[in-house]
Image (cartoon, grey):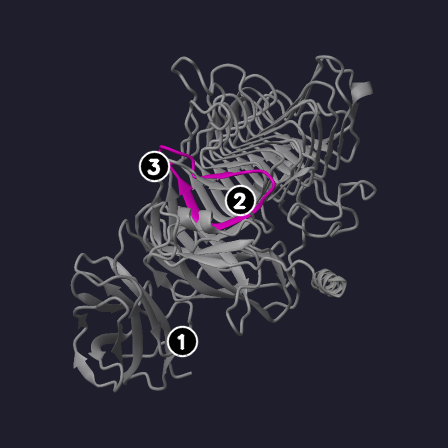
Amino acid sequence: MYRTQSKFLSVFFCLIIMLALIGVQPAYAATLTVNTLVDENDGSCLDGDCSLRDAIILADAGGNDTIIFSVNGTITLGGSHLQISKNLTIEGNGSSSLTIDGNNTSRIFEITSGTTVNISGLTMTNGQPDPEDVEGCSGGAIYNRSFLTLNDVVITNNIVVADTVPPLGCVYPRGGGIMSTDTGSLTITNSTISNNDGFWSGGGVQFSSNNGTLSMNNVTVSGNFADSYGGGVSFENGTSTATLNRVTVSNNTVTAISNTQGGGIYINDDMNITNSTIQSNSARRGSGIFTGYSSVLNISNSTITGNIAVLDGGAIYLSGDVIIENSTIYNNTATNRGGGLFSEGAGELNIYNSTIVGNTQGGLYLYDTSGNGPTAIYNTIVANNGLADCYFDGIDINTYFTGDSYNIDTDGSCKDAIQKTFIELNLGSLANNGGFTQTMALLAGSSAIDAGDNATCEATDQRGVARPQGSVCDVGAYEFVLAGPTTLVNSVLPTSRTPVVGMATTIFNTVINSGSETAVGVTLSMNPAPAGTFAYYQTNCATNAVISPANPAIDIAPASVACYLLSFTPSAPFTATQVHIQAQASNAPSSSLLTGINTWLLRATASAGPDIIALTTTTDFHQLACSGTNAFAVAMSNVGTDATGDVSVLANTGSASLPLTISIQETNPGTGAIIGDNILQDVLAGQNRTVAVFVTFHGCVSFDPALHRIFIEFRDASNNILGSTSTAVSTNR
């Protein structure tokens, strides 16, 4: 008995040792695939269909599972939100492909504390939580209590509402798009938050976490509403400084008649804003930005423009500490005081190398309520503002204001500044001059050039151009660069697309620096800019793989090439428009307009239709003799839906009158044999067709590829352009 017991104990202890050596085996992450748009809740993904709700429920609580989708379209929730109480990643197929609709009967997601959640590639819309739920009536699309990361999401048309039927439940709901509270942290990248209604505050985003951080990068917050404060973003608590980088906050509104604050952004904690645009927001006070007494705000390389305050602080209303560097504050409006900046309370204000121009009721309006904190400006332009460039209302200038002769104003109101006329300043209009934000260029001969103080000068300007370019730095946000032998030329391929509203379409673009100096801060833009969203990405020229975030500003070495992928998503239908894709650098003029070379012929439709991509077999159709007939081929692919009728292939020579005639015939794509005329019948989706273009010359055509071109157009029965391409033409060279 003793030996048996001893043997058992020996085996038992061996097992314990083995378990200790092996350790606890980790739970392995699994991938669940959603294959239905139906919001079912049967607790199974093994019965032939797997809904998003079922996948969330079945995901392993400790396994960091991932949910993906094999379907596109809209998932309409059945009256209750999706609750996530575990570590989880949800990867949609893209915000333009997959939508979750709250059907105005529930919010979309609720994320409980103690979890890490990643959501990407989704649109969330029509979320509306129950106003009778006192604890959870905020957060129209998302109510977050944990660590949440959002990427490539669109959060639009969500709302929170107050309870109006006694006994009252929720009286002050917040966060029309997102509410992040308790211990939650929130990171948002490459996303859009638009047209949400936050009722009391935080129309787009309400962040009120006691133990979390807020980070936003490459995010657009537009068209959101709140009644009291923070029409776009409301940031009230956080364990560390919030960061907003490359964020556009535009057209947000705080709507109530009483004391509303922060049409774009309301801040009552610490925040850094860089490379961002705050534009066309409205409130009674602080239409662009409102800062509370306990806040510290740092703004750099940013532009604040077009904001309208019913009372005070069109661009910024500051009560806390504010530092502004390399930024432009232009054309903001206040009916009462401080269209540019209005300062009251005990906060300190320091401004470096900035441009404050064209604001009403004072560029800088300093008001003493209880003894202002000190204000200092360095290497800054304060010019052409209404009322006064600097207005001191009850302020002891000698005690509370520091300025010197390295600042420039236009009315002598800023202490010790050099007074110049606005003509002498010679500022360009607000425009894309390189960098992430629009700036006001110092034009040649500006009195601000080489007028700064190197001791207090910023290392770069708002665009990232090194300072100083001359003997000393320039005054204001823009550093003048003497134009050198740098020339940018660019081309696009293909040259036409017909996207559907709300759907992205792409082409490729190549930029060449044909000069002998580096092109600094090269960016791309559309001119004119159709209704929609434009973005571009640098690519590897050999593989076309994307190698940059959206909208980079890069340097291109002499005799070097940069390649890009261009993306455009129309927001409304429009007729065929020839759009110039401009390449510009801080030290070079924009690329010249070359129709058919660097133009993108765009037409947007409300519903899917043909989208023809066409290419010629040659970029330069050259004929040795000044008479005779020659031919080139054109291949087309319909990447849209079936054509509803015949497609006519037509040719012209643009604005040039050339001595030639053109005829077109359809060919067999495999053999090249002629099989028809220039009318393509039954052009199906995904179909490739080819034509031969016969050109008969009746005289000589000089080599001028920018002007002498043959344009091939594909038109439907209503004469709408479905696609186009072109080639240069010349003789005897």
Which residues are drawn in magenta?
104-126
- Nearest to N terminus: mark 3 or mark 1: 3
Residue carrying label 2: 219
Which image quarter is the N terminus in? Answer: bottom right
Is 310 positioned to the left or the right of 368 in the image? left
Residue type, numbered disc 2: Val
- Please, what secondary structure does the residue beneath circle 1 have? loop
Q: Position of residue 468 (x, y in %)?
A: 76, 50
- Mark 1 closeness class: few <14, some 14–19, many ≥20 residues within 10 Å: some
Tell me which label, 2 or 3, sits earlier in the chain.
3
Circles 3 and 1: CB atoms closer than 8 Å: no
The answer to whether residue 154 is above or below residue 733 is above
Residue at 47% from the left image edge and 21% from the top image edge: 170
Residue at x-position 38% and y-position 15%: 165
Q: Which mark is residue 619?
A: 1
Question: Does any portion of residue 709 appear in the rendered image?
Answer: no
